Amino acid sequence: MKTKGHKAFASLRAGVVATVAAALVITPLAVANSAEVPTFGKKCTTEGVSTGTSSKSLVCAASSGGKLTWQRVRLAATNANPVAALTPPKGSIEFWHYRPEDKAHFELIISNYEARYPGTKITQVIKTTTDYNATARVQILANPRAALFATARGSIFNDFVNSGLTLNISNQRFVKQNLVSKGLTAGTVDGKVLGVPYHYLFNNPVYNTEIWAKEKWAFPKNLTQWTAWCKDAKAKGYVPLAWPGATRGQAAQISNSALMNSAASYADLSKNLEDLNSGKIDLTSPWFKGVADIYVKLRQAGCFPDNPTGVTEASALNLFATGKSPILPTGTFSMGAVKALNPELGGKMNLMSMVLTDGKVIAEGIMNNTFNLSVNAKSSSTNQKIALSFLSYLATGPVAAIYGNATTQHVNVLDVEYTNVDLLNTSPFQGKNTMLAPRFLILNTAVSDLTQDALIQIVGGKNTDEVLADFSKQIKQKLAG
Amino acid sequence: MGLPALLLFLAFYLYPALQNLQFATRRWDGITEPEFVGFRNFTNLLTNDDLFYKTLGNNLEFTFLVVIFQTIFALLFAVYLVNNSKVNIALRTLYFFPTILSSVSVGMIWLFLYDPNFGALNLFFNKLGLNSFALNWLGDEKSALYAIAFTQVWFHTGQMMVVYIAGLQQIPKELYEAAEVDGASRWKQFRNVTWPMAMPTTLVVMAYTTIQSFRAFDLIMVMTNSTAGPNNSTNIFSTLIYLTLFNELRLGYAAAQTIFMVIVMILITWLQRQTFGKRYEK
Amino acid sequence: MYKVSRVIALVTFAAMILVPSLIVVLGSFKTDAEVYNKPLSLPETWSLGNYSRLLSDSDLDISFRNSVLVTVSSVILTLIFASLASFAIARMITVSGKVLAGLFALGLAIPAQINLVPIYYIFRDLGLTNSYIGLILINVTTTLPISIFILSAFFKQVSKEMYEASEVDGASPLRIYRSIALPLSKPAMGATAIFLFVINWNDLLWPLLLIQESEKKTLPLAMLAYRGEYFVSFSMLFTAVMVASLPMVIMYLFMQRSFIAGLTAGAVKG
């Protein structure tokens, strides 16, 4: 933690108040800057402050007697220390995933692993996301050598589960002791852990701290302030939001923020989304009209780029990387790509909340756990053992650190030391009141795609009521087939 | 003599194709037990699926544009370059060049050229002061289909030109010499000698281009980030079937769509033969 | 008038091919910022950085070899099978000729991708996934109808008298095929070969479905992976396009010459 991100990291600690009830998401605190030296069992002053997210970190919490004391952070399902990787039998398996950009990093991890366990071989099978989502399930079903595979949270993972491909790994010690248990939700079905979500992402806007400081902007705290900010930024010659309307998956990130405060509670929101998914309500419902109205207001305030529906992900990232745009409304996962485009932006990016309501705030940010790693239930038991062993290896702190730092990604593993400045800077977001990305609650791919397309059309300038009616009809027809 | 071809064709083409007929009467996600639904997939397609009709319209428009323009340009350039002079051979080589690129490469190049903010095309129009030509090419549902059709024509005109040149070079020189003796203009020569004599090639070119346009799948997927365009404006049958099959996991429904696509393709081929084939036989 | 319009048309189309090519060539030496902001200008510094970065973490050489192997085998086999069948169709020498003509005409109307899922299950059961042989088989099968369509159109053009003359001599169909039809159809075979080469070389669909092992990937499939890897970096994508296309362009220039030579020396004219 000797990077310059350290300061930003520590300075935010005081502003963050997390409740102990939500202590699974902890505000890390730099011990060196602390007035009180945290010692296990000793008295502390600020509830919710912690010394980090590692298994040995302490958190200031109310004890049974009501006094605030330093207690062991409990991020995993149990209090026990993380375990070492399982020893595999000899043999070889395939590891299927959809992140070509991770190829080299996994290669390194695999070669370390193979050196440690001679006779065991892991081969990566990599496809691009689109092709993976389209063909991998059918191919893995026919290929028991694919003992370990990745799936995206939501409908894709759901499809694999329904195909009976995912082994129940709830009882593995590393699942209980090495992983952040809140982060397992995305891989859990009916109480059974069927996949380990490896990534811990924040789908919140990334902003350029340099431009922000230069323009002396304050962070918009509600919808009114956001529209006012857009007008100001636009007047100053910026493209306020580098929104990639031509790349549905990334254009959709902002919908998480629009959705998160659109209903009275998380329960209401998830019910609405499930009803939309099943066809019980459609896009013309008052609730969704409210969501669409947020987009209309942002559009009218000039938040989006010109020709928004033609802006590809590449072009949006470039708008942000070249400083034409102060905000990239996608998430932490884009920071690596931004840095590749403009290395000077390293350390000059941070995350911001996007509260798009003037009413009640339920959540101030979005988190997401994805890249679910599952063991193939249809593989031989030897191959399953190898897959479990490699998965448990990935779930150890030092290995996960290699991955997280190399890919600029927070990971869902305990005891990871982030050396990457951008990861360090954005870590405090773990202390915010975040919501698991709601858009993935629409499990039907066709409904999900059409919902996003409708919003994209609205940003493109079409009449809101016509778009909502038209797309509701299309959704209805999809659900009828 | 045709036995090896026949065997391969039966085993790996016709048999799986016929399996689609069986699939079309099922509701099936490819994994769980298929459910027999009779003709429901067909009735749904015809009576309760706006996207299907939109796709049909897109596909007809796309195919029509590509076949007409690609054939006209291919023939035009073939006529221009039919003689084997050094310059002509060099130009043929150049024109054919895009064909050797993979559709992934071509899609990536045009994705860049069409970018509304950074693309070379809009840069070009803006420099010339033709700002109104600088469109949101792939992002606007009004222009996306045309933009991809243009790329498709750019991609394959050279290929069809080579076919035409092969055809034109087989036309006996005496016919032109006779026409010239009669004092026929270039247009007359084209009208009376080239066009009728090249008719077998035209049929080949049009039939091939038709099939090719139905297979523009790779290009559309690359250029629209696998979404079939804004508001499905570049969805054609092949992308629709692919997305229904793999994105929505509705194998039975995709099979029903496939059957309609086959019907449409047969109709188009038949129409082409009616229009051009008849005149040729006269 | 004719000359002027000819020159304008030829130059315009030439520019439409040259300019994007130039953007790609120059772009492969540039940084992303330069590609975006000055696509047509020369790179500020001619850096080979993109190339060394691409070559250091790529298997494009293996993919290229795979593509050559699969494409060449597929083209040769298709030409043999298709020309035999076309000859049968054109001459209608057997009943199978008529059956073939009907079947392949139907096959022409049915695009290959409708068979994606059935083919996957069939090939899996036959152990033909992740296999060059499987890929070649499906390539040959799916390109047969179009090859036969093109070849039989040409075969039909070859004058009947020539066939009949040789039949009077008592030559067997196979002999007529070999010593008369084949030499006469050189230009057609050349054109078809180029067609097939292009289709097989560019094909993404079947490798995508059948090949998973990275050491058996063909070029378009490997390219697709690079699209995923460098999805935001057009300079890297252009570099990948360059590396993937350059050996092909050289081969093409060479092939194009012999192809045109073949056309001029065609038996039909001679």
Image (cartoon, coloured by chain):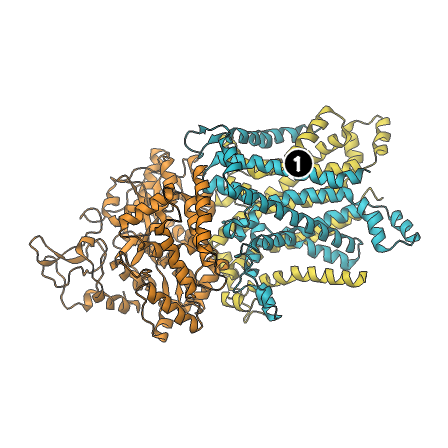
Chain colours: A orange, B cyan, C yellow
**Chain ID, mark 1:** C
Name above or below for residue C237 compared with residue B45.
Answer: below
Q: Which residue is mark 1?
A: C145
Quadrant, the C terminus of chain B: top right
Apparent side of residue A375 relative to residue A29 in the rendered image (left or right): right
- Of the 4 image quadrants, the one containing the N terminus of chain B is top right
Toward which corner of the image does residue C196 lie, by quadrant? top right
Q: Nearer the viewer, residue A442 or A167?
A: A442
Element type at marker 1? helix
Amino acid type, label 1: Pro
**Picture quadrant of residue B146:** bottom right
Note whether residue B148 is visible. Answer: yes
Please tell me whether residue A278 is drawn above or below residue A37 in the rendered image.
Answer: above
Q: Position of residue B277 (x, y in %)?
A: 76, 39
> Vertically, is C27 above or below C209?
below
Q: Residue at x 89, y 50 (%)?
A: B179
In which quadrant of the rendered view does residue C39 lie?
bottom right
With C22 as the anchor, is A306 left or right in this view?
left
